[in-house]
Amino acid sequence: MSSLRLFVAVLPPEPAVQELRRAVSALHALPGADRLRWTAVPNWHFTLAFLGNVDEELLPELHTRLARAARRTEPFPLRLHGAGRFGGRALWTGAAGALDTLRLLAERADAAARRSGVPMDEHRRYSPHLTLARSRTETDLRPFAEALGGFEGTSWQVGEVALVRSNLPVSGVSGERPRYEVHASWALGR
């Protein structure tokens, strides 16, 4: 039986991505930037629920339940906002706008996966973030977070939720990153 490595996400639209890309490009000039593993711009997303490896036989039920979760959630405004870090390992930008609705959508995505038979990790409070860079070793990310801290993106309407497949590197080439592709998506609202 084959499986797919999947996660449920909100994908920012191209104008929001380009605004953030311009802001992040300045961070590459900071000392130590060359030691970080920067997330490829096409891979920028807000993970709602990480599903891991999902057996293909669970996909029809998962699709049905995610479609229902999307229909039950009205479109909502969101924007990329500020910056933060998880210790010295990950740099991220956050979100502002209808965060309660974003958290509700994350809860519904998690519940849809559980009810479809996907074994999910212990549930934690959803913390919206879009990962910009990671470090293999403990690194002082404060200068990066401070430099991006005042970033305020333009608001957009979140109108769909995506089920994204993560294709892990297979080439063995050093530094190769996962490639993400939208497996399915559903419009929000009725």
Image (cartoon, helix red, strand yellow):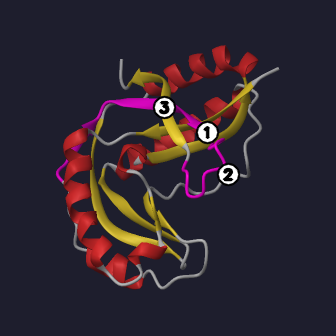
Identified at 36% across, 76% down, the residue is 145
Amino acid at the residue labelled 2:
His
- Camera-side residue of 55 and 94: 55
* Residue 161 included in the magenta stretch of the image: yes
Separation of marks 3 and 1 at Cα, in angstroms: 20 Å
Q: Residues within 10 Å of mark 3 (few under 14, many from 20)?
A: some
Determine which residue is flagged by label 2: 123
76 to 93, vertically: above or below? above
Residue 159, by quadrant, is top left
Q: Residues within 10 Å of mark 1 (few under 14, many from 20)?
A: many
- Camera-side residue of 141 and 28: 28
Amino acid at the residue labelled 3:
Glu
Percent from the top left, x then y, of residue 169?
A: 62, 44
Percent from the top left, x then y, of residue 39?
A: 44, 56
Mark 3 or mark 1, whichever is nearer to me: 3
User: CB under 8 Å between callouts 2 and 3?
Assistant: no
Q: Say which element carries label 3.
A: strand
Identified at 75% across, 16% down, the residue is 57
- Camera-side residue of 26 and 56: 26
Determine which residue is flagged by label 3: 181
In the rendered image, the quadrant that contains the C terminus is: top left
